[in-house]
Amino acid sequence: MPRSAPDLTLPDLTGRRALVTGASDGIGLGIAARLAAAGAEVVMPVRNPDKGEAAVDRISDRHPAARLRLESLDLSSLSSVAALGERLGAEGAPINLLVNNAGVMTSPDRQVTEDGFELQLGINHLGHHALTAHLLPLLRDGRARVVSQTSIAARSGQMHWEDLQWERSYDAMAAYRQSKIAVALFALELDRRSADAGWGITSVLSHPGVAPTSLLAARPEMGRSRATSGRRVIQWLSDRGVLVGSPQSAALPALMAATAPGARGGEFYGPQCWGDAGGPPGRTPLWRPLRTEDAERLWALSQELVGVRLG
């Protein structure tokens, strides 16, 4: 018998401002919609304006009172990240929630960002590191909670320190794992530095488990002309409520991380059943590759690569 769909009751977020990356579809769209429904003003920075407008329309159709704002952001371009930070910084409105959710997965061949970074590391980690750095004054003013979305792939693997950009060899899944380990290490180090410096920022991490999203869909711009066979299997299981989650349930861990009263820095939220792949959200132990001794090393290297200091 298929399991009942898990859900989560969010607190009233009226008067709070949230920014969600990757909010034009999939899990990010679900996160943005639920935050808006709970009363938050949601800033939705997107790369594709048409998809962004469609996402705003979808949320507004279900929640007519939703307060939504589209912004332009390409996480593969440090100049685009800086421009968004400059626009929001000039306004000076505090940010209370930042959900670093956007990402790409397993580009079949090695590709690089505008700034020459391996695509997955550049978008999933370095772009978000730079974005958080540019928004730091607004996050401090808002005593923000920052949620970094890692992946179940980060349960294994390691940082590829000797060839971080995969220039000598390229393994699509290993590069994806590294990028998502980096996301988690960033979250842990951000919280440590906030506590030491008194920034008032609480940094937590989440993972969505497994669900049929656009990560494994056809992505011609990444060299993938059709959906992977893995996505078709995941869709089949999700439709029957077996083993894996849905795009709706996969958004719940990040929503819990963003809104759970009394959440403490460094906590990790994810699905609680079926090998971390699905089920209701809750706190989960850190996985073995998320070694805090690697976090400071990555932080220093990331600041050098993106050219902007985060504390």
Image (cartoon, helix red, strand yellow):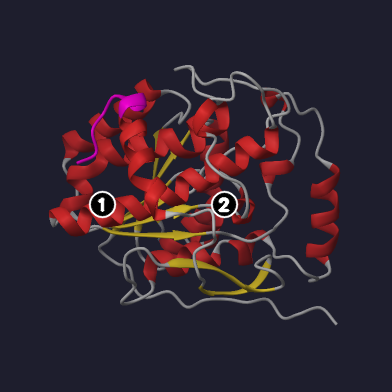
Q: Which one is in front, 12 or 254?
A: 254
Q: Is residue 200 visible?
A: no
**Residue depicted at 30% across the width and 77% down the height:** 262
Indicate left or right for 163 with 225 as reference.
left
Name the mark on residue 58.
2
- Residue 60 image position (x, y, % from top left): 49, 54
Q: Residues within 10 Å of mark 1 (few under 14, many from 20)?
A: many
Would you say residue 305 sits in the magenta stretch?
A: yes
Q: Which residue is the site of mark 1? A: 95
**Residue depicted at 42% across the width and 66% down the height:** 257
**Residue depicted at 45% across the width and 44% down the height:** 21
Tell me the SS state at disc 1: loop
Q: Can you say which quadrant of the picture contains the C terminus?
A: top left
Would you say residue 112 sits in the magenta stretch?
A: no
Q: Between marks 1 and 2, how big is the CA–CA gap?
A: 24 Å
- Residue 86 image position (x, y, % from top left): 24, 30
Secondary structure mostly seen in magenta is: loop
Indicate left or right for 190 with 194 as reference.
right
